[in-house]
Amino acid sequence: MDRRKFLGLGLAALALAPLTKLNATDFRKEKPDAWKAEKPADAIKALYGDIKPEEKGVTIKAPKLAENGGKIPVFVKSDIDAKSVAIFQDANPRAAVAVWTVPEDGIIDYGITIKMKGSGKITAIVEGKDGKFYSKVLPIEVSKGGCGG
């Protein structure tokens, strides 16, 4: 098969292939009070309402002792069939860190690098498609001297 026919067939197949509809919510626009809240509980309430998340089904991976508070890697995983995932922290003036819309049949395995001005707790909230909320809280100590001491 020559190159032109191959490219033509490839483009035709691409045009006929069903495209997955991506649907993302601009949480900063839709829920601005969540981004102004100083405490995680207030930010969670502004984003999701008055909820009582179950403390199961969510994993947070981050260093227990962060050498550099300006660059802390945080990973959130879950097998829950979810609508959204949010991360909050209590060490900075604003509690909300990030919110993701989970695509249909999406896998929750998200990573982000955050900044914390001092030691505190990270909270991850997963909004399940079952109407329930799930959470995990992880304390992180930020090194004062930058060398673990």
Image (tube, rainbow, N blue to C red):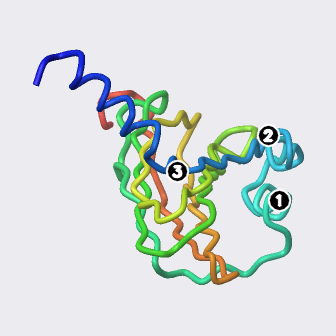
User: Where does label 2 land, which residue?
Assistant: 28
Tell me the number on the disc at residue 42. 1
Please state which amino acid type lies under the numbered disc 1: Asp
Q: Is residue 69 above or below residue 38?
A: above
Mark 3 vs mark 2, CA separation in Å: 24 Å
Closest to the observer: 130 or 42? 130
Please state which amino acid type lies under the numbered disc 2: Arg
Which circle's residue, 1 or 3, is located before the other in the chain? Answer: 3
Secondary structure beneath dot 3 equals loop
Q: Position of residue 81 (x, y in %)?
A: 51, 74
How would you rate the neighbour count of disc 3 (Cα within 10 Å): few for under 14, some for 14-19, many for 20 or more?
A: few
Secondary structure beneath dot 1 equals helix
Q: Is residue 57 above or below residue 47?
A: below
How would you rate the neighbour count of disc 2 (Cα within 10 Å): few for under 14, some for 14-19, many for 20 or more?
A: some
Number of the front mark, 1 or 3 = 3
Tell me the number on the disc at residue 20. 3
Q: Position of residue 44 (x, y in %)?
A: 76, 61
Mark 1 vs mark 3, CA separation in Å: 35 Å
How would you rate the neighbour count of disc 1 (Cα within 10 Å): few for under 14, some for 14-19, many for 20 or more?
A: some
Q: Position of residue 138 (x, y in %)?
A: 48, 62
**Identity of the residue drawn at 43% across and 47% down:** 17
Secondary structure beneath dot 2 equals helix
